[in-house]
Amino acid sequence: DTEVTQTPKHLVMGMTNKKSLKCEQHMGHRAMYWYKQKAKKPPELMFVYSYEKLSINESVPSRFSPECPNSSLLNLHLHALQPEDSALYLCASSQVWGQSPLHFGNGTRLTVT
Amino acid sequence: DAKTTQPPSMDCAEGRAANLPCNHSTISGNEYVYWYRQIHSQGPQYIIHGLKNNETNEMASLIITEDRKSSTLILPHATLRDTAVYYCIVRVAGAQKLVFGQGTRLTINP
């Protein structure tokens, strides 16, 4: 079991759909992260939120839109995705930005058809 | 952050100690060595980290050479559940990003 909960576990969406990934933690952490992981590759950082403010955007295409409505929740809104965006999307949190350990959820496996 | 080099894969017998090496020859004085692992179909899991001294916790031991150019993660009594990809990461305290390398795929054999 992980203390970072991601929903849904699996998602299949068409290229014209709009969907959202959700991440929740109740450890009081003030930094939250989105990573993307393609098959047999290491996770790659997408976004970092610190105290609910976007602190890092790793040049992610605008079809991915993050949102941090409060310190416990992190969303990733998806729109007009491409098949190459199919991947495992991992959420993580840490007590504060720049400090480890990062606590990861088990991810949402996204398939874009 | 300094680059790390890990063997792509290793095997270990169940019940034996698994020793995973990591080279970080360009590490600077304020960079920590972190280890994470990722079991299949799960998110990465933090294992241990250290700066200069050897460290031990309930999961593993971390041995860092005196010149800090390499380190070894030791799983003292490997079980089948330790089969995973192990990532060695070098990171400055307060660094903005945690960047994963390719890691070592460790297979524990019965």
Image (cartoon, coloured by chain):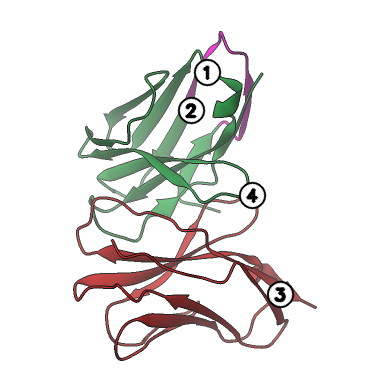
Determine if marks 1 and 3 fall on one subunit.
no
Q: Nearer the viewer, residue A18 or B29?
A: B29
Residue designated by label 4: B41
Q: Amino acid at mark 2?
A: Leu
Q: What shade has chain A been given?
A: green
Q: Which residue is mark 3?
A: B108
What amino acid is labelled 4 in the image? Answer: Ser
The residue at which mark 2 appears reads as A21
Subunit of mark 2? A
Position of B37 with respect to B54 (left or right) is right
**Front: mark 4 or 1:** 1
In the rendered picture, chain B carries what hue?
A: red
The structure residue drawn at horizontal position 29% and vertical position 88%, both measured from the top left corner, is B67
Residue B90, x across and y down, in percent: 34, 66
Determine the image quadrant of residue B100. bottom left
What is the quadrant of the N terminus of chain A in the image?
A: bottom right
Give, as a single range, the part of the protein colored magenta: A8-20
Mark 1, secondary structure of its residue: loop
- Verify CB contact (< 8 Å) between mark 1 and mark 3: no
Dot 4: what SS?
Answer: loop
